[in-house]
Amino acid sequence: MKLTALESISQSFANGRVIPYLGPGVLTLNYTGDALPGSPLDLVGRLTAKSSVPHKVKNNLSAAAQFIENFKHRRTVSAAMTEAFGGDAQPTALHKMLMSQPDLPLVVHAWYDDLPQKALRSRSNWGLAQGVSQSEHFGNWVHYYDNDGSPAGIGPGDCRAEWKTLLYQPLGSVWPECNYLVSDSDFVEVLTEIDIQTPIPEAVQQIRRGRSFLFLGCRFSTQLERLFARQIIKRSSEKHWAVLPEEPTRNEARFLELHHIERIPIDLSEFVTNYSSKVLVN
């Protein structure tokens, strides 16, 4: 009998073969504490509320961040990002369920909040790998941290054996050291090397082999979103899933087809409330 998508996901979670890939849309779910930017458009609105930018880049996150960086300094961008994602926001039910899985070797979190870290704090056997800006850390692509936020002091090809879960945040995060890839120049540096996988940690490249990705709260409507997703899932399984209730754009549909990503056309909240017990409990 052919398994449904949710049954296949559940079975793969039980075998440790699923890698959650979380995007900003996860923040549409209910959570407590300060409100966080839940989309690039929301975030660019926060950045430009205190720093005026030309009208033509007002709704373009990376271009607006670059303008502020050029004319007011990188510190202004970092301070605005930290203000936007600081505060006491707490993990959603989805974060808690995902991070409680007993066999969860890797989580990819492609946004700047720290809710996954907070959800993992009930555990001790995990660590972080975060993308860092070349403008602030020239020559380094990734910083590694233990679960208390202290630098792990390991090289780019290493991963602590005791880390049963690696949280990979390719865009950086507000915690523990306010690392952000957000401006045009940040992305130009990464995209120059990402095709040969240089900015992607060796541990991520190893763990993803043969595993499937589950995209949650993600869109693939921009070239940047597609580029990061494509390079992160490279050389993994030939089967993936995306919870995507909106009708995909032409570019999104092509991306899904090209990379064997099955669309699950339900709301993220519906996925959590009605299907979480089927999907996430062994």
Image (cartoon, rainbow, N blue to C red):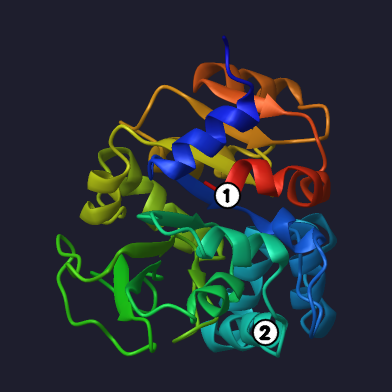
Viewer-proximal residue among 112 and 75:
112
Viewer-proximal residue among 162 and 251:
162
- Where the N terminus falls, by quadrant? top right
Q: Residue at x 41, y 37 (%)?
A: 233
Q: Position of residue 126 (x, y in %)?
A: 35, 72
Q: Is residue 175 above or below residue 31?
A: below
Corner quadrant of residue 170: bottom left
Look at label 2 and name its amino acid.
Ala
- Residue 239 as seen in the image, left or right of residue 162: right
Viewer-proximal residue among 2 and 170:
2
Q: Position of residue 189 (x, y in %)?
A: 38, 57
- Residue 152 as seen in the image, left or right of residue 254: left
Mark on residue 80? 2
> SS at mark 2?
helix
> SS at mark 1?
loop
- Residue 181 as seen in the image, left or right of residue 133: right
Query: CA gap, disc 1 to disc 2?
Result: 39 Å
Is any atom of residue 58 visible in this view?
Answer: no
Q: Is residue 154 above or below residue 264?
A: below
Mark 1–mark 2 CB contact (< 8 Å): no
Q: Residue at x 58, y 19 (%)?
A: 3
Mark on residue 281? 1
Q: Residue at x 25, y 40 (%)?
A: 196
Q: Position of residue 78 (x, y in %)?
A: 57, 83
Q: Is residue 115 above or below residue 56?
A: below
Viewer-proximal residue among 60 and 28:
28
Residue density around tag 2, few if under 14, some if 14–19, many if 20 or more, within 10 Å: some
Mark on residue 25? none
